[in-house]
Image (cartoon, helix red, strand yellow):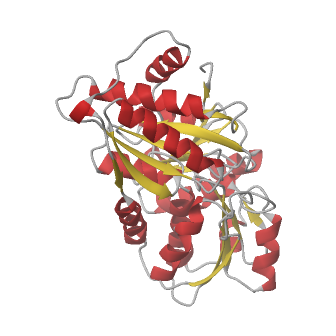
Amino acid sequence: MGKYFGTDGFRGEANVDLTVEHAYQVGRFLGWYYGKDKKEKCKVVIGKDTRRSSYMFEYSLVAGLTASGADVYLLHVTTTPSVSYVVRTEDFDCGIMISASHNPYYDNGIKLINSKGEKMDEETILKVEDYIDGKLEIPMAVRDQIGCTVDYSAGRNRYIGHLISLATRSFKDMKIGLDCANGSSSSIAKSVYDALGAKTYVISNEPDGVNINTNCGSTHIEKLQAFVKENNLDVGFAYDGDADRCIAVDENGNVVDGDLILYVCGKYLMEQGRLAGNTIVTTVMSNLGLYKACDKVGMKYEQTAVGDKYVYENMMKNGFVLGGEQSGHIIFSKHARTGDGILTSLMLMEVIMEKKQSLGKLCSEV
């Protein structure tokens, strides 16, 4: 863990702990670092959530990156996993997501993503921190070496198309509730479910810059529970601010957390012969009930320290395809390099549709 960057990026109260100067310095270093050994300009893609301060940090990062000679592609308001997807599928040198995830609106953060769509390695992050602390000097780009910005909403649209393509069948006649936390998924989730034929009911999808995560989303699941019951919905999904988490609600209004999602999806993949090693990767925070249920059906499990970073490392080291946390960070490594809330909800829908069972029934064994 670095001086500024924790396991989930550089995070803190906007203009108190994390300032526009910090963002500019991060941009300056990354633009130089990824461009110094290339003949052509380096390419960096940036996404942001709906916090008011995200615009400020976006412009600061852009100023730093272009001043160091990078070309910057702007996805605008989008999810963390969409940045990861675009980086790894479209030949970018790195990606940046501006978000403080499930934190209140006055916090913000800078998450760095490598060219494979994974969280940035510790070595590079320590170099960024050395530059912030004034331990090295880097040159300014001049003349035609100065970078430019590109409106890249097309990248976000390709990610939406990717999500739609993963569904195994139509969701016709399914009544599905979505709580978008007034965050990143507000611009993506409904269009995905509409395209798949669902009767989509949405709450908390009117961001105003200060209402992200406020009494809504995966950290305030009670709002979606009430909504599902009031509208007699088949299932509900709540995302967090940057949509890398998903917590579900079954048809009876019961909470289906990350542990239950791992069980339902893991068991289904195992039955299909698609669960590598018949093993899911969990953290030490997972519930004993999950392990007992796994034992009953012959599903194995690994335990890691808390943090999706450690879950992902274990998955990559051992070739496992499913892992996650109780908080709803679930990684399906066949499709993503990071937790992806909308993807997780689609994978749960696959089980519901293919097994022709309600989510409540599928969870009842735990």
Q: Quadrant of the N terminus?
A: top right
To which quarter of the image does residue 94 belong? top left
Residue at the image position 55 percent from the left and 45 percent from the top: 98
Percent x, y of residue 185: 57, 63
In the image, 228: left or right of 155?
A: right
| Observer-nearest of 161 and 69 | 69
Give the vertical position of 175 relative to 185 (above or below): below
Write the residue at 67% across / 81% down: 234
Residue at image x 54%, y 63%?
342
* Position of residue 51 measured from the top left corner of the image (x, y, whole percent): 65, 53
Q: Would residue 168 be found to the left or right of residue 191 on screen?
A: left
Residue 290: x and y in percent read 70, 50
Give me the residue at 76% from left, 86% from top: 231
Q: Is residue 22 visible?
A: yes
Q: On the rendered structure, is 3 left or right of 136? A: right
Compared across the picture, whether 98 is left or right of 235 comes to: left
Most extreme residue toward the top is: 135
